[in-house]
Image: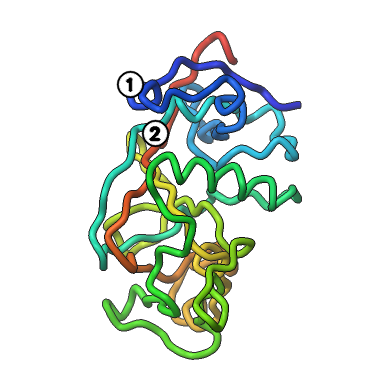
Amino acid sequence: MNRHVNLPPSEEGKKLNLSSQKNDQFKAVYKRVENCDDLYEFECLYSPEIDYGEKRIIVPLTSVYNGYERFSKGTNFVNILGSSNDKPYDEQKAKKRWKDFAQLANITWECHAEKDKFYDRQKIDIPATGKDFECNGVDDNGNVIDANIVGGHVLMETTVARELKKDSNAYIIPICKRHNSKNLPHFNSNNKNTTPGNGNGFYMKLSSDTNVIKISGYVPANKDFQ
């Protein structure tokens, strides 16, 4: 059973002026921090098709939304480890929700990572090349493949994919499925402590100047939703 917690909107969240219908549509999932009773950590964007269980809370995105931040072309970014959810759900419905939300922050629904480039964190600024490293967010004519774009959960201005740190922000930006969770044997065989298939072992660069959605990485536990 899903646990919905109706937290009040943040100052930035109020500025969105969402209808009650949109507020129900845009939500975020937070999981309890291991060995910590007073913090929940951002895990993923909410999909109503998934049962997240008792150890997670679902809150309005307006309550954790911290606005958006603009970053320059070439800015490094990485996937947040542990932020994906591998349970089945209706991808098309989820994509439409987060495509709509990205538009509220004036973010185009396309892969914002440099096309066909995956950067090895052991070889700064030298991208891997070849068929295994092709972006799958556009077709052969350069048109965006909507079904292959997701709301990626990322950390900005770093080259090391990792879990969130306490009091840090999480960022959400549209990227293609391959940049979001590609299993790259090249990186996984050359870098220690990598986990296949979750976007680890490499970093990306922004393909252009763009806004990036910013949300709170952690939510303090409250006795009302223990």
- The residue most toward the bottom is 130
Where 101 falls versus 23 (above or below)?
below
- The residue most toward the left is 72
Task: Kindly identify the residue that appears in the image at 30 percent across and 81 percent down.
Answer: 123
Instruction: State which tag comes first along the sequence, 2 or 1.
Output: 1
Name the residue tied to disc 2. Answer: 216
Dot 1 amino acid type: Glu
The image quadrant of residue 208 is bottom left
Q: Relative to residue 48, is residue 65 drawn left or right? A: left
Name the residue tied to disc 1. Answer: 11
Label 1 Cα neighbours within 10 Å, binned few <14 / some 14-19 / many ≥20: some
Where 188 falls versus 200 (above or below)?
below
Task: Kindly identify the residue that appears in the image at 29 percent across and 59 percent down.
Answer: 158
What colour scheme governs how the chains and residues are painted in the rendered image of this protein? rainbow
Dot 2 amino acid type: Ser
Q: Quadrant where the C terminus lies?
A: top right
Q: Relative to residue 75, is residue 82 drawn left or right? A: right
Q: Relative to residue 117, is residue 47 drawn left or right? A: right
Q: Do we see residue 39 in this rendering?
A: yes
Give the numbered dot on residue 80.
none
